[in-house]
Amino acid sequence: MLDLFSIISRGGIVLWYFQRAADIHVSLPVNSLIKSVILQERSGAHIYEAHKLYFKLDNEFELIFVVGYQKMLQLSYIDKLLDQVMLEFRSQYKSQLLHNKLINKFEFTNHFQDILKQCEDEVRITQEAPRKMMTFEQSSKSKKTVESLKKAEAKDVPKTKPKKTPTPKQPVMMPDVLEEKPDMNHNVIANGTSPADDLTEDMIKRNLENLRNRKNKANAPAVKGKENGKTKPKGKESRVWPYGGNKGAEKDLDYSKPRSAANGDDGHLYNGYHGDANGDDTGTTNSALVEVGSMRGQLKDLDTRVDEADIDYSEDSEEEESGSDIINGTGGAAPGGGDVKRSNSTGQSMKILGGGLFGVFKGLVGSKTLTPETLEGPLEKMREHLIGKNVASEVADELCNSVSLKLQGKTVGSFSTIASSVRSAMEESLTTILSPKQRIDMLRDAQARARGPNARPYVVTFCGVNGVGKSTNLAKICFWLIENGLRVLIAGCDTFRAGAVEQLKTHCRALNALHPPNSKGVMVQLYEKGYGKDAAAIAQEAINFAKSTKFDVVLVDTAGRMQDNEPLMRALAKLISVNNPDLVLFVGEALVGNEATDQLLKFNRALADHAPVGVSNGARTIDAIVLTKFDTIDDKVGACVSMTHSTGQPILFVGTGQTYTDLKVLNVTAVVNALLRN
């Protein structure tokens, strides 16, 4: 039985509602559905406590029909009920909806009760009716014809090769007169001329010389170990690998000193920061790679790879295409070096709407209303396109369903209108998914914490699977914070991987070389206890040490772990619950597809399930995402959509290289355009 039914507008006005259960108000589950599903461009059922909710959109009048019932029940008439209620409500109050009179009172209870009773009676009659036997026309045998049966029988008969009958041998008849064999030394042609008559004297001399050289080579003794007149050295020759390194290349590979210091002129490092008393240089970076002061303030966005001016929504874009593609939406150049000439204002536009993803909408012409059957084929093409862009298959299905719900019921006039409406629906869905639901400004929060009356360090914890670049991107974020005048303490809580502490020590030396100590002290310092220790205890000691030594930010580096490793996930949940960091960042690769959703969901679930009992702050989950290796994927940026769609958490930083300055902020427009590009 139904517990609730509500009809609301896109603006949030409740037009009519029905409520059967008295223990819960209809607004609570409906608000949860709007917040978690509709606003996040999702589709399907939504679970709120003990209730399951479905919804249907009326795109013509901008209405939302919501139905809810106990999730333990299995009601087969929900889809039919939503369709009939929507049609009845539209027919009863069409004039008011057309004139946008939504404040009036809608008396729809009796109509709803009649429709609900009709649906329940139909289901009851169907369940109580005896099961009818299948007719012959409904069976699979009716589809088999006599000819198909004959072919099947012919296939079952094994093929036997016919036996060959031996042919009797015929006696050989000997000829009475044997034919005279021609003389090999005098090869005479039928016309009475010899081949030698056609040869000139030069050709004869050349042939004799070649014959003489061939005989000399055949009679010459074979010399062992010689090739082309060169003697081979004895023994196996060692292979020299390119860029393998040797003793002479040590000076070229040493970036800890300037070129003058490498030649023995000066022993100082960059920015006036010297080595220690033992002569151990503390800088490991090159000024050509890292520009000090370039990351002050907020981080830069990713560059938009597709310009709106290069997108042609007209139907003529396919006909005007001459075969040359425009690279990255910037126009490109001709093979001869000149610029590509444009035939009109938009010119040779990208194949976004011509013959690629949106080419499937070319058959949808004429003034008609879009239906699920009409959009089924194009949305399947859209799904394949998104999966090709590295979007997880489940997320691609959700996105296509969302676009389908937006387009159903809309009336379009021409192909260009269909293409533009589909593109706008896709852009709106993708932009809504990728846009952050809450503000996370790490730099502003850290500066406010450091200057506040109760100054204490801003704690950030990094977690993720193995090999995604947690320590490297931690160092990038550390460099960005130092550029903005914040002192950073790195907590080496990766006590499992060999070399993890040494890697952080290397980063600290490089960062201190770029930013020497000032009046506050050393800008970055590493707090570590070696290997095999409790990571949660090390993080707690590091936070206390940062409080006593006036550090502004604490960056906690954790060990990489797979999402299915329960002991390590328990240790991570303990570290986060005990220390209660201000920000929990999940570091993931941009190269993964379906694995991105699995990793993020299992990390979130493990942090919630394995949180210690009795912790006052409750279970902490992932707050934001750091996406690494973004420079290696070209336009296959589907991992952004998969990760943000699975948890609703924003992508805070994007790693685009291997230097400290290769840290950007996600540009939603760039990602959406890359996803829509063929």
Image (spheres, helix red, strand yellow):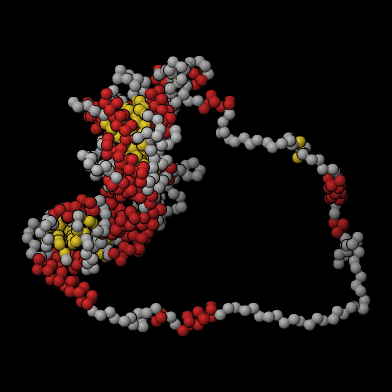
Rendering coords of residue 595 (x, y %): 38, 50
Quadrant of the rendered structure where residue 590 is?
top left
Rendering coords of residue 125 (x, y %): 20, 77
Quadrant of the rendered structure where residue 122 is?
bottom left
Q: Is residue 664 above or below residue 634?
A: above
Q: Is residue 187 above or below residue 442?
A: below
- Front residue of 72/395: it is 72
Rendered-image quadrant of the N terminus: bottom left
Give the total of numbered labels.
0
Answer yes or no: is residue 566 visible.
Answer: yes
Answer yes or no: is residue 306 visible.
Answer: no
User: Which residue is found at the position 31% from the left and 65% from the top?
Assistant: 374
Rendering coords of residue 658 (x, y %): 42, 35
- Front residue of 120/187: it is 120
User: Which residue is found at the position 11% from the left and 62% from the top?
Assistant: 20
User: Which residue is found at the position 10% from the left and 59% from the top?
Assistant: 22
Rendering coords of residue 127 (x, y %): 23, 75
Q: Is residue 288 left or right of residue 86?
A: right
Q: Is residue 177 left or right of residue 469?
A: right
Quadrant of the rendered structure where residue 546 is?
top left
Q: Is residue 362 left or right of residue 108?
A: right
User: Which residue is found at the position 9% from the left and 66% from the top?
Assistant: 109
